[in-house]
Amino acid sequence: LIVEPLVLGAGGMLMYPAWVLTELKRITEAAGTLLIADEVMTGWGRTGTMFACEQASVSPDILCTSKGLTGGTIPLAATIATDAIFQAHYSEDRKKTFFHSSSYTANPIACAAALANVEIWHDEPVAERIAALSERQAAGLRRFRDNPRFTDCRTTGTIAALDLRTGSAGYLAEIGPKLRAFFLERGLLVRPLGNVLYLLPPYRITGNELDGLYDAIEEAGERFGSKP
């Protein structure tokens, strides 16, 4: 079973409580199958903890991580597995070895970026920044809860999302490209998922910068949103 823990990303930034993940782990164990956690987006503090699975006290059989591994500076991904899975694919007998290689495996520049990122996590108060950003995101979305042009305001850690009320919804909604152009005109890189607006800001973003984003979202609601 492959899951995005706590937050379903490109599917609309749908969020679910930790107990659901705990139950999924119980189901997979009972069925004798693997739980694979796709933490490409949710890992490295995005949901408030290093990995989202921690909030459900769940240890997946396989965990995929990327993006935050290098602080977003250069593409790099890693797959972490239990010892049982590792041993099942390891053998000194070449006839039994699961050979896998790639032209870009262990790219030295990407690995150097990852090491530098790990050093930042070790030497700087990253956890405190994440906690502060999580609080700012939750506070920032409160201004939209009574705005009739928006619905389903939600946050998980540093991730904030809300839906713009429009005539069409969903990933392919025509409003998506219009919203993207609207934000680019204001020097803001926001990737709408159709009518869904979400913010995954860098952990060093300032309060003023966040307020500017919220102001732009409010303006977008006035221009493109509709009332119920």
Image (cartoon, rainbow, N blue to C red):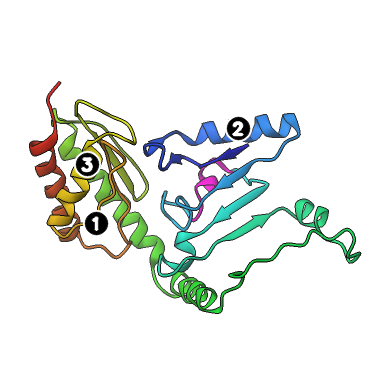
Specify the segment rendered in magenta.
50-57
Kind of element beneath mark 2: helix
Residue 54 image point, x, y percent: 54, 48
The image quadrant that residue 11 belongs to is top left
The image quadrant where one finds the N terminus is: top right
The image quadrant that residue 33 belongs to is top right
The image quadrant where one finds the C terminus is: top left
Residue 31 image point, x, y percent: 73, 29
Kind of element beneath mark 3: helix
Of tags 3 and 1, the one toward the viewer is: 1
Q: Pick out the residue farthest to the top.
A: 228
- Report how far apart the C-alphas of labels 3 and 1 lie in the structure: 18 Å
Judging depth in this view, the residue of 152 and 66 nearest the camera is 66
Which residue position holds label 2? Answer: 24
- In the rendered image, residue 135 lying in the magenta stretch gets the answer no
Which residue position holds label 1? Answer: 189
Q: Is residue 188 above or below residue 2?
A: below
Query: How packed is label 3: few (under 14 Cα within 10 Å), some, or many (20 or more)?
Result: some
Residue 141: image tag: 3
Residue 138 placement, left or right of 90:
left
Of tags 2 and 1, the one toward the viewer is: 1
Name the residue located 32 percent from the left edge and 35 percent from the top edge. 172
Query: How packed is label 1: few (under 14 Cα within 10 Å), some, or many (20 or more)?
Result: some
